[in-house]
Image: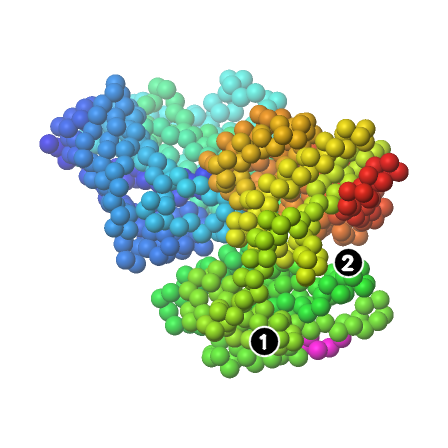
Amino acid sequence: MKNWVIDHIHSTIGFEVQHMMVSKVRGQFLSFTAEVKAENLLDLTTAKVVFKLDGNSINTRNQLRDKHLKSADFFDVHNYPTIDFISTFITKNEDSYKVTGDLTIKDITKPVTFDVVFGGKAKDLHGIEVYGFEAEALINREEFGLTWNAALETGGVLVGKEVRIIIELELNNGSLAAPLNKENKEEQLNYNKISELMTSEQINRMVAENINDFILITDKTGVIHYANPSLKTVSDTSIQHSNFFEHIHPEERDIIKSEVISITGRTIKKSLKSEFRLQHAEGYYLEVEADISTIKETLNTYSESELVLVVMREISERKEAEKAIYQLAFNDHLTNLPNRRSFMNELRSEVIDRRYSDSKLTVLFIDLDNFKQVNDQWGHDAGDIVLKEAADRIKKVIRPSDVVARFGGDEFIVMIKDAKDVDDVIKIVDRMLEEFQYPINISNQETSITCSIGVAHFPEHGKSPEDLIQNADTALYYVKDRGKSDYKIFNQDLEHQSLERRLLENALRQGINNEQFYLEYQPKVNLITNKLMGMEALVRWKHPELGIISPGKFIPLAEESGLIVPLGEWILRESCRQATTWQSKDYPHLSLSVNISVRQLEDIHFVTKLKSILQETEFDPTRLELEITESVLANIKSTIPVLHEIKKLGVQISIDDFGTGYSSLSYIKEFPIDTLKIDQSFIRDIHTNKESKEIARAIIKLAKSIGLRVIAEGIELEEHVDELSKDGCILGQGYYYSKPLNVDAFEDFMVTY
């Protein structure tokens, strides 16, 4: 059998992974070898195909992501430098093939089948016959031990398990180049003649003069031979004959230039999509997405005068909206610190870097002591002042190389990098405790806020980011239980002393069995008409000995232990039963919102249980709304079918606390979702904080553009109502209208409101 030569310039091997924010994460292996043995490329059934990919050459245009993909969590190129495929058998169906073989990644070998399509046969400039093939295969990354660091993506955990391997090969038989004959030479057109054609009315008629897209034709060196009127309006009339690459932002110029060169000279024609920044005539840059393809004069099939057609459309508004919401994913808008997701992203990266080095890393988990008393005594505005002051004091103590983030509520977390030793860490901790001894001025009155700190060192106290944080948290709660305003370094004994947690879990289990829970209902109101529209059911726990236990304490434990499944089922049944009772007593027919957890949706019997509850309670499903968090959308394959089954029952679906995680609205529209609920953290200061106002406005505007309703939670002031109404938000809930009410109080509210 013949050995066919791979044209590496025009051949690529890459992959795609579905991702909620950017639609797809794409990458390529810049270095690979491929061997194709076949008697005839028009019949591959007897061929032998082998390729070897250099894992260290992976390129996704994101250095942090590339570093992760090369790490031990993913391809582990240090121990397994290559990815290998060897075909075992090939079947043919007209012009397509099924190429089955063994794919080996990290010493794990699995059978994989590529769908291969014959792309065509043609002659290159030297008269050599070239054959084109395109191949794709799907693999499950988890089967090969490939753990994606989801925090590297703006969508957090929203990264698919399926990886699509995409191969494009051009093959020839390695013949020597034949010189161009006289006939071919006579067919070559000079660029001046083409340029004249490009500015003629004949070409202008081919390109609609009133199209909004920006269109230009350039050669592979970047010289622009034609620019349509739309492009000239944002650039200038002199753009024609200038260099296209010079109009691209310097950070992206080389990438786009490389892409343009890569598609020119191809025997098998391909187009590509790209995004970059194009310079406006006034000096600033427009965000554009572009379709780039090659075109040729039909009389000149083998000439060097190949041109490139670039069709661009502006996406600046979309990018600005995504940037605004991006802030929700990685920044805490109150303290302007990185948030939990941003911190986890960097911590994972630092842990990966230290697996092959001796450099130090320490995590400090910080909790403000008695912060709830500040909120209760002075109100939430005072609480915000304290949180911002706490953030400033922590930043004042740590070094420039260290990282501090707001982890949630009154919790902060610090990453100390490359400390000399434990004593060096303790000096930082002591200074932090000392800094918090100074009082904080609230409304011209001084109040004291101290903090407690848990400490965990890598790798002694955890080899993964999750273990480090969990153990620092365990050390923190040891301090909280023993007087506060101190620190504790984690040790193994602490792990065995978390008795309260186990006791609370047992109490929670008994509480469910002994019906210690009850529901309160918070009204939902039309902000324009002030009409009562609905209610949200909220669970409460009254322990016979401990009294009222905060939902913030038992809900996370119920989630983690799985007890949220029976508890959530009780909440759903009881709230539907109560709503039906009110309906039978001629109270207003209101919509009912119930929070549903990830664990409940993962229950394969959830839809059956929901259907049974609706039938049992005789509650109208069209008036029931299930509130889910963004993390529920992480597993696309399992989530979409469940949500569609719920929708078939007539039940509405809402995303709760929108903004505390991150989802691309362009991706959310693919899910059967009806409503976005804007998180209260963006409502609290919407009347005074320009950033919060703009973020809320962006969410409302974009949600409406894809047909979603919007409701705001946490409305406490008339100014909140005014701002939200002005921006087009119709529904809201919060203490401005009413706190959550027990059954009797809510009945009175329905009558008197």
Q: Is residue 542 above or below residue 4?
A: below
Drawn side of residue 326 relative to residue 270, left or right: right
Sequence-wise first label, 2 or 1: 2
Residue drawn 27% across the image and 54% down it: 80
Drawn side of residue 47 relative to residue 20, left or right: left
Secondary structure mostly taken by the magenta-highlighted segment of the chain: loop
x, y (%) of residue 381?
A: 78, 59
Asked where in the image residue 232 lies, by quadrant, the reply is top right
Tell me how many marks there are.
2
Q: Is residue 4 above or below residue 567?
A: above
Residue drawn 78% across the image and 61% down it: 376
Q: Can residue 123 be seen in the rendering of this structure? A: no
x, y (%) of residue 621?
A: 65, 28
Dot 1: element:
strand
Q: Is residue 547 above or below residue 313?
A: below
x, y (%) of residue 321?
A: 64, 41
Asked where in the image residue 90 lies, by quadrant, the reply is top left
Residue drawn 77% across the image and 33% down it: 582
Q: Which residues are magenta?
A: 435-439
x, y (%) of residue 702?
A: 66, 36
Magenta span contains residue 458: no
**Which residue does the numbered mark 2 point to in the structure image?**
380
Which amino acid is tagged 2?
Answer: His
